[in-house]
Amino acid sequence: MDTSRAPRARTLATEAVHAGRDDLAGLGLHAPPIDLSTTYPSHDSRAEAARVDAFAADGVLDQGTPVYARLGNPTVARFETALARLEGTADAVAFASGMAALTAVLLARTAAGLRHVVAVRPLYGCSDHLLTAGLLGGEVTWVDPAGVADAIRPDTGLVMVESPANPTLAEIDLRALAHSCGAVPLLVDNTFATPVLQRPAGSGARLVLHSATKYLGGHGDVMGGIVACDEESARTLRQIRFATGGVLHPLAGYLLLRGLSTLPVRVRAASATAAVLAERLGRDPRVSRVHYPELGGAMIAFETVGDPHAVIGAVRLVTPAVSLGSVDTLIQHPASISHRIVAEDDRRGSGVGDRLLRLSVGLEDADDLWDDLDRALGPGPMDVRTLATGLATAAPPARTPAGGTPEPAPRRAGR
């Protein structure tokens, strides 16, 4: 039998299950171990000092016995390895939260004397606030995607975008944007899409950010953040993580690695349900506009004709809560919660209006979710019980792809 042929590259679904676990069989293990140690014994203090010096100089820590949990942890390292493989990058560095991860990136650029950031709205509200408030000594210029190249200055250290964006689901041509960035690193927040739907590094992004709290964990029970990147950037980020202490707890690293194993299945199943709900919302006269990305995914944004707060108060199966990416469906009013910290004019100018609701679709049955939303939306321009026949002749509201031009809504799916 010919064994010389190189093995075929693994699919994403296979990588999600096996990345970060390749050594387990050799260790006689099936489940990854959780290393909760904060410190590690060593009788060779000279060698330990040399390893610490090497880390301080260039961010490299060899694969020997760990020194201290703030430098690195074996369980967390497994999650980092797995996410890097899924995103197609050389490395990844995990943090205690998505905001800790973004903070580390900004500190790294500022430390290099590059304090200026070019960014495109909308971003997650706290990301927007961190950039706008100058809390890390930086400065931001907000532009449309077409204006990125003109906004870059000699001290620009980063271009930052989120696509699909939170909460409007606006999409950006990442390859074209990366070209506009030139030598300036492009950071893409890929939290909404996950590597299941897009891999920004393949389009030229140097840094890929995730709030791992969301889809990577997937069950609403773990908080974390991670940056997928090249090896040089990873070394600097690990030095900042060590100095600032924004480390990911090993138990969180274990849960996030476990979450990755079902990520493709969860994202694809939730995306299929979201597409059904987006279609139904797009045909409903109680909804003035639906935002659903061409990329697909499990996130929907829609603008109500009536009071959006009444919808939040009326859902029973859907959970009214901040965050997203869980196995259960969540709904929230961005202008009141996730983007409340953004100045009102900036918020509205980026499409985050007062009637916009953001729906993170989970793994429940589509019909059960629709029944709950149908009740929560309340009476519309006509008695909702006549919609099945009335919609056959009534003109539906426009359905707008994120960032696109209104188009006729698709045929209403059965309830």
Image (spheres, rainbow, N blue to C red):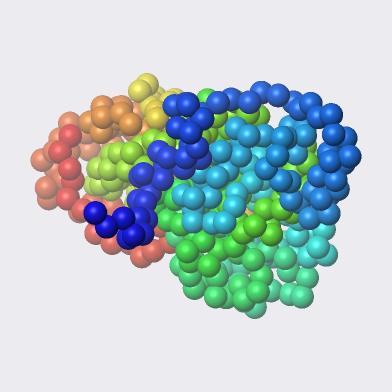
Query: Is 67 displayed left or right of 141 in the figure?
Result: right
Query: Is 18 displayed left or right of 378 in the figure?
Result: right
One can see residue 345 in this view: no
One can see residue 231 in this view: yes
Query: Is 155 displayed left or right of 281 in the figure?
Result: right
Work out whether residue 234 or residue 270 is closer to the camera in this orientation and state it. Answer: 234
For the N terminus, the image quarter is: bottom left
Q: Position of residue 189 (x, y in %)?
A: 55, 52
At x 68%, y 64%, the residue is 158
Q: Position of residue 335 (x, y in %)?
A: 55, 42
Q: Position of residue 174 (x, y in %)?
A: 49, 66
At x 31%, y 55%, the residue is 3
Query: Is 249 displayed left or right of 26 in the figure?
Result: right
Work out whether residue 284 or residue 168 is closer to the camera in this orientation and state it. Answer: 168
Asked if 69 appears above or below 14 in the picture, the reply is: above
Asked if 329 appears above or below 114 in the picture, the reply is: above
At x 54%, y 56%, the residue is 89
For the C terminus, the image quarter is: top left
At x 33%, y 31%, the residue is 363
Asked if 177 appears above or below 53 in the picture, the reply is: below
Of all residues, the one furthest to the front in this rendering is: 1
Q: Position of residue 401 (x, y in %)?
A: 36, 58
